[in-house]
Image (cartoon, helix red, strand yellow):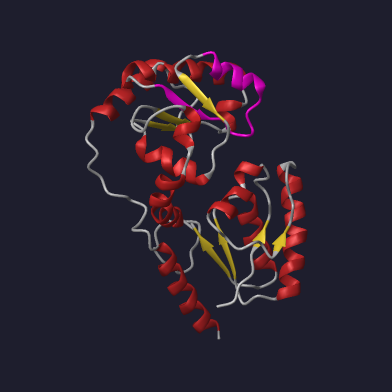
Amino acid sequence: MPFSVIYANQHYAERMNRVFFNELELPKPDHHLGIGSLSRGEQIGRMLTGIEWILLMRRPSAIVVPGDTNSALVGDLTADKLCIPAVRVEARLRSYDRIHIAGNTIADASQGYAEHAQQHSGIFYKIGLSKGEYSLLTYHRPSNTDDLTHFAALMDAVADIEEVSGFPLVLPIHPRLGENQRHAAARHRHITLTGPVGYLDMLALLPNATLILTDSGGVLPAGLEASELRSAAQALLRRPVAWTNPFGDGFAYRRILDGLTATADRLH
């Protein structure tokens, strides 16, 4: 079925947007809103105006809205006001309409590009480490990074993980972190800092790490003590890896397309 892509450019750093289009060979957006670095209210206001104009011009039979970002909120709201059906991917329990359990499209992408990433990523040469000889840390939540004292304390805590795992921590620096945060991390000799990494480099790093620490999804809360983090790391390293992927089998896209097709048939 024909479709058009609206790209809000809410994630405006080079290593956070265009790299995905290039590495995953995605089609270029038909509409680029160029939102960039604005306050949340300004982002939402400009997206409301831009998306409304596009929907009025193109009059699509439905709009597909992925994720839970500001652009997803605006896509839902604009479609509702224009009486255009909105199909939400990653709806969770927010919707009382009919729900299709599809799986996670991130799992689709991860499984689809995993082998390609292992063959073509040059990240291990760049960081000077070998597969299986590092732990991986990602760190970007404002609640953990904006307060420099808190950020430095958490860096002290995660640096101790080296004593547990026996390997250095690799920390790709998120674009939103400033020089003070970089210095707070760099003063620990067991933390290896890198610039932001692309999607394929991250796919190469993830399966080859002895341990992964992340604040994606709100992990690493404000009250975490270093001793608690060390204990959690020790428990994880002792636990055998015997679980299956809870996010799907890599074919969520097929179930989403089937749901869209069925919905289109009902609408017509």
Total marks placed: 0
* Depth check, front residue: 160 or 216: 160
Magenta region includes residue 173: yes
Relative to 243, 155 lies left or right = right
Q: Residue at x 74, y 50 (%)?
A: 35
* Depth check, front residue: 242 or 127: 127
Where residue 12 appears, as percent x and y from the top left, is 68, 45
Q: Residue at x 69, y 63 (%)?
A: 78
Relative to residue 116, is residue 158 depicted above or below? Answer: above
Per the rendered image, the range of residues in magenta is 168-187
Q: Residue at x 55, y 17 (%)?
A: 186
Q: Quadrant of the N terminus?
A: bottom right
| Residue 90 seen from this side | yes
| Residue 99 seen from this side | no
Where residue 101 appears, as percent x and y from the top left, is 39, 63
Relative to 173, 229 lies left or right = left
Where residue 176 appears, as percent x and y from the top left, is 64, 33
Q: Residue at x 63, y 34 (%)?
A: 175
Relative to residue 19, is residue 62 depicted above or below? Answer: below
Quadrant in which residue 234 is drawn: top left
Quadrant in which residue 194 is drawn: top right
* Depth check, front residue: 107 or 87: 107
* Depth check, front residue: 183 or 126: 126
Magenta region includes residue 127: no
Q: Quadrant of the C terminus?
A: bottom right
Q: Which residue ends up furthest to the bottom in the rendered image?
A: 268
Relative to residue 219, is residue 158 depicted above or below? Answer: above
Quadrant in which residue 214 is drawn: top left
Relative to residue 116, is residue 227 depicted above or below? Answer: above
